[in-house]
């Protein structure tokens, strides 16, 4: 049987799905919310400073105490979150790089612990054309 070129072998899928996460590292980054996923209780955040793997955009799992509906897109927050990292084996890393052209040495998950609004401006929009 000939396998499709796009298919990922079971041994790669198994390692990725069963990745063992190390002890989380707490990080603080400022940035803003790009998207809010109420149903999944997650947000996408654009960070000014990158996380360990160089990304500036991450998806954060929200704790139950933070209501997604009370968050605002586009305003600046300081996010305090746990970064969970699960390193991948050299064999899987090399397969992804050679066969799929994906540079990935670890899987990351991010859990928001708290956030603080930093965009402290007037809540009333300015009228620019008033004279």
Image (cartoon, rainbow, N blue to C red):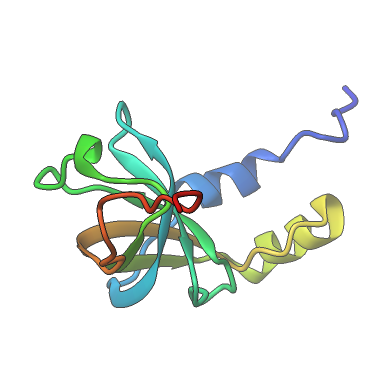
Instruction: Please state which of residues 104 and 128 is positioned toward the viewer in this rendering.
Output: 128
Image vertical order of residue 12 relative to residue 31, above or below:
above
- The answer to which of 113 and 14 lies nearer the viewer is 113
Residue 57, position as x, y percentages in the image:
53, 59
Front residue of 118 and 33: 118
Percent from the top left, x then y, of residue 59? 43, 51
Judge by depth and name the residue closer to the eye, 45 or 85.
45
Which residue is drawn at the image coordinates 37% and 56% (left, top)? 75
Q: Find the residue positioned furthest to the front.
A: 131
Of the 4 image quadrants, the one containing the N terminus is: top right
Apparent side of residue 12 relative to residue 126 in the rendered image (left or right)? right
- The residue at 35%/68% (across/down) is 83
- Which residue is at a point 74% across and 56% down the rendered structure image? 96
Is 45 situated above or below 66? below
State the residue lying farthest toward the top: 1
Q: Position of residue 56 (x, y in %)?
A: 55, 66
Count every numbered label the image shows and give the total.
Answer: 0
């Amino acid at each position: 049987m000939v396998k499709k070129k796009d298919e990922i072998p079971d041994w790669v899928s198994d390692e990725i799905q069963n990745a063992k996460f190390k002890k989380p590292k707490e990080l603080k980054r400022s940035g803003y919310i790009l998207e809010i996923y109420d149903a999944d209780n997650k947000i996408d955040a654009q960070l000014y400073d990158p996380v360990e793997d160089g990304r500036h955009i991450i998806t954060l799992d929200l704790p139950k105490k933070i209501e997604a509906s009370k968050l605002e897109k586009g305003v600046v927050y300081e996010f305090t979150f746990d970064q969970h990292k699960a390193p991948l084996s050299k064999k899987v890393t090399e397969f992804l790089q050679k066969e799929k052209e994906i540079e990935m040495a670890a899987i990351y998950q991010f859990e928001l612990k708290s956030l603080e609004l930093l965009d402290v401006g007037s809540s009333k929009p300015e009228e620019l054309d008033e004279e």
